[in-house]
Image (spheres, helix red, strand yellow):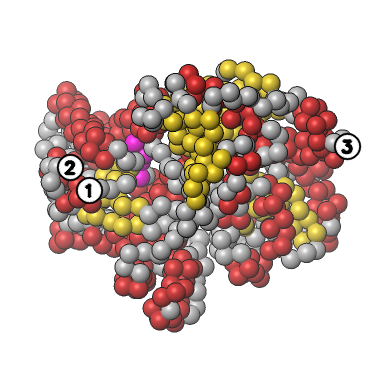
Amino acid sequence: MTDLHWLPAIPDWRQRLRALAAEPATAWDSAVALANARLNFVLTNALDETVRRVLPCGPESLATKKVRLAVLGSSTLTHLLPGIRVAGLRRGIWIDTYETDYGQYLQELSESDSALHDFQPTAILLALDAYHLTSGVTAGMDAATADAALEEMQGRISETWRLAREAFRCPIIQQAILPVHLTVLGNNEHRLPGSRAWFVTRLNQAVRVMAEQEAVDILAVDDRAARDGIGKWHDPALWHRSKQEVTPTAAPLYGDLVGRWLAAKQGRSFKCLVMDLDNTLWGGVIGDDGLEGIALGQGSPLGEAYTAFQEYARELSRRGVILAVCSKNDEANALEPFEKHPDMVLKRGDIASFVANWQNKADNIRAIAQELNIGLDALCFIDDNPFERNLVRQELPMVAVPEVSDDPTGYPVALADGGYFEGLAVTDDDRDRTSQYQGNKARDALKAAVTDLPSYLRGLEMTLIWKGFDRIGLQRIVQLINKSNQFNLTTRRYTDEDVVAVMADADAFGLQLRLTDRFGDNGIIAIVIGRLQDNKDLLIDTWLMSCRVLGRQVEPTTLNLIAREALKLGAKRLIGEYIPTKKNAMVKDHYARLGFTVMETDQAGGNRNVLNLEGFTPAETFIHVTEG
């Protein structure tokens, strides 16, 4: 199914679209709300056309950077662009798109005066069709000839990536090849070396290996087509008439796959799954039916479906998604299955925030976000009750609320198909996420038990482990740079290539900082990039930290490290910038609090600060510092 089934239908959608056109001042927020509806190809195009007419240059201010996406391909792609742009709206991202002339992607990449170079993309989608990639491959080929053709095509794709990377130094996503070719041998097609169908299978495998080596991401339309059926994605009649490899009916889903990738690149994927309990994690009402009466586990199809959903949630947790509970229940009743039911897959220790009371769920979700110290726009809430879903959508429009029925078999499908937790890589810190939040609870308990802050900080027994940027930590460094918003002085976003460039720059340094204490490892909690200027000022280009460690003297300890590394480069002064966004007001006075002198401020609320390094005295803290 290529419809956006995880999004709710909005009965008065067209009336609201007309109202959007009449109210430019609120058009952006209205467009985001309308994009988060179950749209088909026609409605997607209508929304895109209206938004581009009312907001031709996009909104004046955004929480994210605008994206200039170049779509390079070998088939007709124009009909896919509205779906990509609307998918951006769905995630609060403005996307400008550029499509190369038909089949001219290599020429435009190679020619520095091409329209593509004028567009200067900040992201590139390479969408090559199966007919183009299998040209010249025939069933008459022997194994050696087919292998040579495969190697040649890998080289051509890799060369395209190289041209794009050298020209624009921006993220690249390679569309996997759609399996559009019919088999000619049948079930054992793999025994025909020159089969186009088998060639596509082999090429998809090879491209994924190449992409891993060359830091290119994959748009997995082949996996999606395998679930939906290739007939939902490709119509041979449309190919022959208009060279559309992807059907228009699949365009909204195609666009959503691209949109969720761009959101992940900006750190805008959701971080936490908030789950209801009764009729969501188990069947029945625990307060009425009791432990023996709820449906869960082996013995019934319904019970097995709830078990399967819990298993999926646990798998999400294992790759770094935070799990929380929000239930209208007495807490003792709500906890009983976690503690006593033998078929309960999720345990209390898997849940980072457990809220069970009789207050309204919108307020409880606010409390969960506050407890976890993450934004409301990082939460995805799943509940079988349509009243609760609609309440949260109305009160907290920034919270993702997938539309589900009362059939639990659809719960994991809605989460997976919705792409809420789209990721680009998994780090060790991601895998340890739940234990890190459990550690925070232990730290809070210690803080409540002591009578003064110095005693609390001393009792944490903290160690800050620092080291320069390296390729081992590259994924986590890029992940933090692109998803940290609150404690982030400049909110500059960097690609893998940008971070590698810092590593190679003799006049710059990059620091990654890990904090451990008696309750465990907090993971990588801070990233700093410093750049030496011609006048011997050291510009703190990037300084970001996890909000989980605020108030533990990490800030002055980090400044000590920055000053030391700056002096090694011959710097005379430190220059700290604050560039305001909608989310980082908490660090507006960060540099002033650390002893910098404000040099200048601007009308937007930003400031520029200076600290002389001559005679700099490192701050004394309760944190032991060591190089990792």
Check the image and report above or below for 18 versus 73. below
**Amino acid at circle 1:** Leu
Name the spot of residue 33 as percent of width and height, x first. 49, 68
Whether residue 218 is in magenta: the answer is: yes
How far apart marks 3 and 2 lie (CA) works out to 64 Å
In front: label 3 or label 1: 3
Check the image and report above or below for 419 versus 504. below
Residue at the disc numbered 2: 109
First in residue order: circle 2 vs circle 1? 1
**Amino acid at circle 2:** Leu
Q: Secondary structure at mark 3?
A: loop
How far apart marks 2 and 1 lie (CA) works out to 9 Å
Q: Is residue 512 left or right of residue 255?
A: right
Residue at horizontal 56 percent and vertical 40 percent from the top: 597
Residue at the disc numbered 3: 451
**Amino acid at circle 3:** Thr
Q: Are marks 2 and 1 in contact (CB under 8 Å)?
A: yes
Name the spot of residue 43 as percent of width and height, x first. 37, 71
Residue at horizontal 11 percent and vertical 38 percent from the top: 136
Looking at the picture, tell me which residue is in the foreground, 374 or 157: 374
